[in-house]
Image: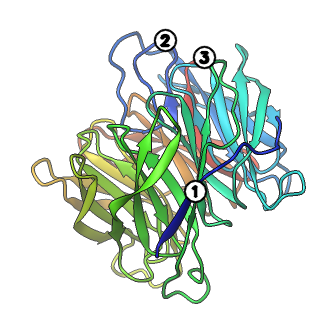
Amino acid sequence: MWIKAYLCLPAVVGTFGVVLMGTALVGSQPSDKPQRGKMPAELLVYVGTYTKGESRGIYVLRLDLQTGRLSEPELAVEVGNPSFLAVHPSKRVLYAVSETSESRGRPSGSVSAFVIRDDGSLRPLSEQSSGGAGPCYVALDGTGSHVLVANYGGGSVTVLPIEEDGRLKPASAVVQHEGSSVDPKRQQEPHAHSINPDPSDRFALAADLGIDRVLVYRFNAQTGTIVPHEPAGARVAPGAGPRHLAFHPNGRIAYVINELRSTVTAFTWVAARGTLEELQTISTLPADFTGSSYTADVQVHPSGRFVYGSNRGHDSMTIFAVDEASSRLSLVGHQSTGGKTPRHFGIDPTGSYLLAANQDSHSIVVFRIDQSSGQLTPTGARIEVPSPVCVRFVEP
């Protein structure tokens, strides 16, 4: 058994992401493209953090799209351990997990909704239990009617309905993963690390580091339920530790980054059957690297021509080119992130800049993206933000 699922009764708990408001650029996938409207001169940049040290919550900066410069950070809202963020596709609402092991005396983290004010600050709207300990990932379905959450500590995934005004309702479904894998330190039990809707919104794909599987669920946007699909998903190599997943803009390829083995596995996604078929696995590290390193995030450039992955230890971004015919990856090179432990990163909607969040050196560093080669060049912009771990863009 890989999983066991059950619908969640209402809990007694009260109260992906690039979004350009007013345009057709919606959703939390970095590959989304604007279809109408004029690109603004600047974007709001929201940064999720860990609040164990100097950080107090979610910070907001402004990115100048002409120069690549960043403004000084301001505290947008005070909240504990907002380690992952997502923005509603049509409402001015931002969602954040609080990555904790306990919420209101129960073994669970929480998920909060915040209204995005005109000045970029955030106003608390609602809070709900995440349905498990240590929530580390949040995404929205394409309709904007549900939030999907991965609970790393609890090894579960959760669906939370969204009300008309953007506030969260109690969980409509929770799925508890089961199993283990070969790494005695990291894989003795399930650790759900991400969950993403597929482009059709008929399925949700959850990468579980602890059991070396990408699990596929049938997702019902009307009822807010997720049901294990048959076949139940795909395996990666034993000990690989799948972490995050990104779809190619063509909707037919899913790239999964594996934390423990520092690899990316490309899968062909057959939407008609809801199946993943392995196409390729490729290392994110230089062939001569002998140190310790763990991957974090994977994203596809809006053009679909390049894939990027972050390496913690090697402290770099890996740059892959995507073969137009086969969607297979080939290594372009590596770029130092100019700091320690790059966690999440953001590619702005124009595909011009990549912002790396260096968690342990407390910095956001900006790189210009070469549209022909995918190579990254530092712009010289480096802003100090305490313990940054997630980057999201919103139009002011």
The residue drawn where x is 79% and y is 42% is 57
Q: CA distance from mark 3 to mark 1?
A: 40 Å
Under circle 3, the secondary element is: loop
Residue 375 at x, y percent in the picture: 33, 49
Up-down: is 73 above or below 51? Answer: above
> What residue does disc 1 label?
6
- Rendered image quadrant of residue 125: top right
Q: Amino acid at mark 1?
A: Tyr
Up-down: is 279 above or below 138? Answer: below
Under circle 1, the secondary element is: strand
The reply to whether residue 10 is in sight is: yes
Few, some or many C-alpha atoms within 10 Å of disc 2 (few <14, some 14-19, many ≥20)? Answer: few
Name the mark on residue 22: 2
Residue 382 at x, y percent in the picture: 62, 43
Is 343 or 247 nearer to us in this picture? 247
Name the mark on residue 396: 3
Is 149 or 304 nearer to us in this picture? 149
